[in-house]
């Protein structure tokens, strides 16, 4: 059924559009550092191809393979279940240990976690006389690199996967400048018991610009938990902004958040946190389903959420990254998709090892567009100048609202891939990967290509 999409089609000889070539030259990016492909949706007619068979680091455009593969392998209605157990049913509102078992839910948000705990209170449980016992056995992360990709370990994009990932292990700080007093307030959400916040931020008078570059954060252990210290200069001209951090180890975050929420619900935890399995004889106290995979995929692609993508990738392999990669390859082979250059490490693109070619990304997009799951998949991609990672890109240009595209960015990598409907109503697949030390400067070249496609310059007879 897919043979017509997979046959190698002749490439029309055509140089780079002048605006694209000029933008690359001005950025100091050599032609050999780019790979791109433009082809018509359906027919697969290629109108522009440069280094398209070359293995490239795709950055977050690798999420296209992970999310579409998951939609096919798991189904759009797939959900993850987080469960609570106790040693025995409650007596007088009390239980012994409380067991929290995770399944790798990519979207166990603060609100969802609160709903799960609220079920305990609804069942009359007030006091946990033992420990909070966490079961993370669903994921096997042994032997796999889960450390930060750069020297910014507190940034949320560096959060590692976790079978019990709650609220992305994130802390949101709302920065509120007060020019009259010359101060900057930092309002945390959620409040985490055991986390001390030390605010040494100073108010600045510079333009807003890239305001995060002027901020610093560090975390240190204390006898009672951890201390998060904020320092640097925050421009008053920025007004209120949200600063996302991931300052705590997984156990400290989970226990601190649990204690805070459970206390707010009128509950009490006497013990601490420890790891362990759920006993076979345990009593099920509560459980909560995640949002559907279709919704999870939308969050992953619209906002390029790395840890959600890594959670999803591991779910394809029963919690093991090697098994997940094998599952993707089997699915590709079953659909006659031969991608010999493919390297998948964590499925998110937050990797120095992952590789795929522009040609094969385009083939994947062709297959996805011809699938019954096309509406769910395409709707998950950012819409140019409208939402997600493309909300502030190409505003006011003709292509605004006419392209569903996934972006990708790492140091030395700039990528974009997806679908563009040109002004004549023709749909195109566009893939543009840049691997070069000055890759970030290549955004203008990518935008020029997208505009060229929208204008209909890719039209062929």
Image (cartoon, rainbow, N blue to C red):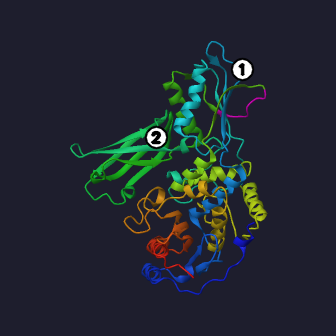
Report if residue 142 is visible in the image: no
Question: Please, which residue is most extreme toward the top here?
Answer: 92
Secondary structure found at label 1: loop
Q: Residue at x 58, y 47 (%)?
A: 295
Secondary structure found at label 2: strand
What is the number of the mark on residue 237? none
Q: Quadrant of the C terminus?
A: bottom right
- Badge 1 vs badge 2, beta-carbon distance below 8 Å: no
Q: Which residue is mark 1?
A: 88
Q: Which residue is mark 2?
A: 227
Q: Residue at x 61, y 46 (%)?
A: 106
Question: Is residue 277 located in the magenta-colored stretch of the structure?
Answer: yes
Q: Is residue 396 left or right of residue 406?
A: left
Q: Quadrant of the N terminus?
A: bottom right
Chief secondary structure of the magenta portion: loop
Q: Residue at x 73, y 55 (%)?
A: 324
Q: Residue at x 28, y 44 (%)?
A: 183
- Image: 180 above or below 223: below
First of labels 1, 2 by sequence position? 1
> Which numbered mark, 1 or 2, is in the foreground of this view?
1
Label 2 neighbour load within 10 Å: few <14, some 14-19, many 20+: some
- Image: 132 above or below 217: above
Say which of 201 and 113 sits in front: 113
Magenta segment boundaries in residue numbering: 274-280
């Amino acid at each position: 059924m897919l043979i017509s999409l997979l046959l190698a089609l002749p490439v029309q000889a055509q140089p780079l559009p002048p605006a694209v070539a000029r933008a690359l030259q001005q950025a100091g990016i050599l032609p050999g550092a780019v790979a791109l492909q433009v082809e018509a949706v359906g027919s697969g007619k290629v109108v522009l191809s440069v280094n398209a068979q070359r293995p490239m680091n795709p950055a977050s455009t690798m999420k296209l393979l992970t999310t579409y593969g998951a939609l096919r392998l798991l189904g759009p209605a797939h959900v993850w279940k987080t469960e609570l157990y106790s040693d025995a049913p409650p007596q007088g509102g009390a239980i012994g240990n409380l067991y929290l078992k995770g399944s790798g839910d990519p979207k166990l948000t603060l609100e969802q976690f609160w709903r799960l705990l609220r079920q305990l209170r609804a069942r009359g449980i007030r006091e946990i006389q033992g420990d909070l016992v966490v079961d993370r056995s669903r994921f096997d992360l042994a032997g796999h690199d889960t450390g930060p990709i750069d020297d910014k370990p507190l940034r949320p994009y560096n959060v590692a996967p976790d079978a019990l990932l709650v609220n992305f292990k994130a802390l949101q700080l709302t920065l509120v400048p007060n020019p009259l007093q010359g101060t900057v307030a930092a309002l945390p959400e959620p409040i985490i018991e055991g986390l001390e916040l030390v605010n040494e931020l100073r108010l600045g008078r510079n333009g807003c610009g890239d305001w995060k570059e002027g901020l610093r954060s560090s975390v240190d252990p204390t006898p009672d938990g951890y201390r998060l210290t904020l320092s640097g200069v925050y421009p008053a001209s920025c007004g209120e902004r949200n600063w996302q951090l991931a300052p705590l180890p997984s156990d400290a975050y989970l226990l601190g958040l649990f204690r805070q929420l459970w206390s707010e619900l009128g509950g009490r935890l006497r013990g601490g946190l420890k790891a362990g399995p759920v006993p076979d004889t345990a009593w099920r106290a509560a459980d909560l389903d995640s949002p559907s995979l279709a919704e999870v995929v939308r969050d992953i692609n619209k906002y390029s959420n790395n840890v959600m993508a890594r959670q999803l990738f591991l779910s394809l392999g029963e919690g093991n990254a090697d098994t997940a990669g094998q599952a993707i390859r089997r699915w590709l082979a079953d659909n006659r998709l031969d991608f010999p250059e493919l390297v998948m490490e964590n499925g998110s693109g937050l990797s120095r090892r992952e590789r795929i070619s522009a040609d094969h990304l385009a083939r994947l997009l062709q297959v996805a567009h011809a699938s019954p799951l096309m509406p769910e998949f395409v709707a998950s991609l950012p819409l140019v100048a409208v939402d997600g990672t493309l909300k502030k890109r190409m505003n006011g240009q003709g292509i605004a609202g006419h392209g569903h595209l996934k972006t990708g960015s790492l140091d030395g990598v700039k990528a974009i891939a997806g679908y563009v409907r040109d002004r004549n109503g023709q749909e195109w697949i566009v893939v543009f990967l840049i691997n070069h030390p000055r890759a970030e400067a290549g955004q203008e070249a990518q935008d020029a290509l997208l505009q060229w496609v929208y204008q209909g310059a890719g039209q062929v007879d």
